[in-house]
Image (cartoon, rainbow, N blue to C red):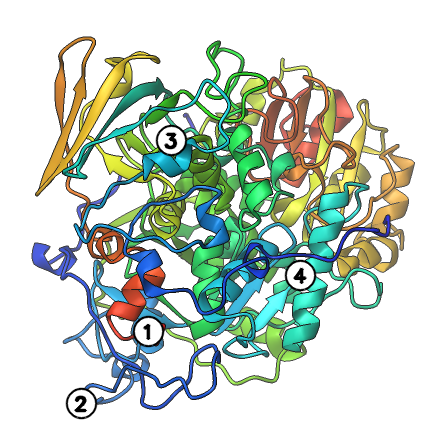
Amino acid sequence: MAAASSPSPTFASQSTSPSPRPAFLFNRPFLPSPSNLSFSSRSFSSSPLAPLRCFPFRRTAITVPCASAEVSSSAKAFRGLCYVVGDNIDTDQIIPAEHLTLVPSNPSEYAKLGSFALCGLPSSYTTRFVSPGATKTEYSIIIGGANFGCGSSREHAPVALGAAGAVAVVAESYARIFFRNSVATGEVYPIEVEDRVCQECQTGDEVSVLLEEGGGRLINHRTGKEWKLNPIGDAGPVIEAGGIFAYARKTGMIPSEA
Amino acid sequence: MAASTTISPSTSFVANKNELGFSGFVTSRLPSAKRFGGGKPGRKVVAVMAPPQKAERMPATTGSVKNAMTMTEKIFAKASEKPKLSPGENVWVNVDVLMTHDVCGPGSFGIFKKEFGQNAKVWDREKVVVIPDHYIFTADERANRNVDILRDFCKEQNIKYFYDITDLSDFKGVCHVALAQEGHCRPGEVLLGTDSHTCTAGAFGQFATGIGNTDAGFVLGTGKLLLKVPPTLRFVLDGEMPNHLLAKDLILQIIGEISVAGATYKSMEFVGSTVESLNMEERMTLCNMVVEAGGKNGVVPADATTFEYLKDKTTKRYEPLYSDGSARFLSEYRFDVSKLEPLVAKPHSPDNRALARECKDVKIDRVYIGSCTGGKAEDFLAAAKVFLASGKKVKVPTFLVPATQKVWLDLYTLPVPGSGGKTCSQIFEEAGCDPPASPGCGACLGGPKDTYARMNDAKVCVSTTNRNFPGRMGHKEGQIYLASPYTAVASALTGYVTDPREFLQ
């Protein structure tokens, strides 16, 4: 085994901020972006379903093309181009194992993970999620079939999607570890839909995802079709709190940061 | 499928539909005055203990009709310190062991430090087990750096169980097999790992499942995790195990039956006379692929076989838990194992089940025997059995990757029954296999390009591993047929997918 003459290992958190992290960082359910990982202070709306993307932040250092997810002021809707996949998209297709040496909590490697998002899809997917040479995706919403995210427990999977610029996945069902990781990291919003939308949408369609009390709607602006979305279910309180750590602090399970 | 005498899922035993409904979040509180994760001195714990419920007898000893629970429910109840609970409830569970490896460890440690502070200490230095196993025989710099990260963290935290790879006496191999061999799997406990095949440990009658980095970071600081109690699917496997079948065939049968999402969010309980006849490693194979059916965890009731295996491996006290007689299961599936036949899972899904004999025209390029699923000592002994019965040489490159150091040593020392004292390694050499490689995950998941036996071209491979989605072993157009060690060897001997009954009578 080759001895590594590697630089001393770093954690993303070492480079900046004092510890512990300010509580308000976690009021926001989903806020992944490389700049966030340097833990600069930010303030967030207190709405339970706060904007899933703070768009100006995501825009920094992005090469064209990139996902343009419009975030409405009500913070419960997002609109962008969709990328359609089929059933049983497993974690090896989302992020092939050879890229797992990238550590998600390291900002530059986080970005690199994004560039490899969904690169494991077979070549039958002629339009790639991230264009060759690009680091970000044009498609902010992924539309899937059944059992999305099956396979490994690697958190790199939702992280890669989020790092690439996806804000949400709308699928018929999810594998549980992927769903859990999506909620825990806040990287992509895992939304459930009853209908076979992956057969009624095409990659490149402009769609809107509206999250409402008791569910929501998916709208395809090209076809005009609309579908009902399932309510978020048990994950709701955890997402609303801002992730597992925030939820634990809120419910007194771990000390609040003070 | 002709041989299948499986009965379709019987009606559920759920007496009251509401019992399986969501009862919302249960926010149990901390015991008083316990500090979590350290951090700044003088930090007060905000949580206080709610008035304790009058805990009657422990769930395990209840055995009564009133609060009948399945094994998994009982483990949850014990771990969350509740006298009873039902599927669908979300509870904070105490974790007995947290395992991580070189792929997810660095990320988990990063999150732990970010959330609990740079100077935070893990909740219990004896309950964290760190096992580098995925990318450890590679020149890839980042992979090597990741092992360094593990080492630095373990040194700083004084982690008791860090199986480093620099000192070969410490090095173990594939985490799930090492966990068992080192005595970290115990009945009745909760074991979480940053790897989906952590469910393997369910073979010991414990709750074991895979989690991501963020959850692991949380556990590192608190020793707890919020988990939803899963309902249980029961699989009753009866009948004498034919001599051409292995546990791999049984689990492929089941996954083919219920599909890759058939057990999503559910527990899979394996009982029956066949299960009782399996040794621990075969039980591990059974539970290992629970995740391939979407399962949250798999369990096999602990029995004499379990206790015997554990005797020389752990001195920790454990308390086996068992499903109550009147426990409610979501569904029950019954199999007459004596009627089953060797199977494969064809590309590109673990539920793409087919009879091995019906794939005999599929020409193959290589065979891979290894991984937590099919690289244990029992798997290699099984492989040796077929080579012995045949006496011939392989027709395609046959890669052997023992899961752990211990397995590797076993290959070179254990005599194979009926061989006149030969070891597995001798039998494999005579058959023309590649020499056993360094223990680890190997090419099961592809990995860095220089990984041994990685599929770098579009080839057809029969493998004893656990997944065959596109690109799993490296090349996107590679075709992987999942199979038992018997079937893998039979296929190596003919150069086609082959039913092992061609050699085993």
Quadrant of the snapshot with the N terminus of chain B? top left
- Tell me which amino acid carries mark 2: Pro
- Tell me which amino acid carries mark 1: Ser
Residue under pointer 3: A166
Badge 2: residue crowd in 10 Å (few <14, some 14–19, many ≥20): few
Badge 1: residue crowd in 10 Å (few <14, some 14–19, many ≥20): many
Cα–Cα span, label 3 and label 4: 33 Å
Quadrant of the snapshot with the C terminus of chain B? top right
Residue under pointer 1: A256
Cα–Cα span, label 1 and label 2: 22 Å
Residue under pointer 2: B51
Q: Are marks 1 and 4 on the same chain?
A: no
Secondary structure found at label 4: loop
Label 2 with label 4: CB-CB less than 8 Å:
no
Residue under pointer 4: B131
Mark in front: 2 vs 3: 3
The correct choice, above or below, for B363 with respect to B54 in the image is: above
- Going by the image, does B289 lie left or right of B261? right
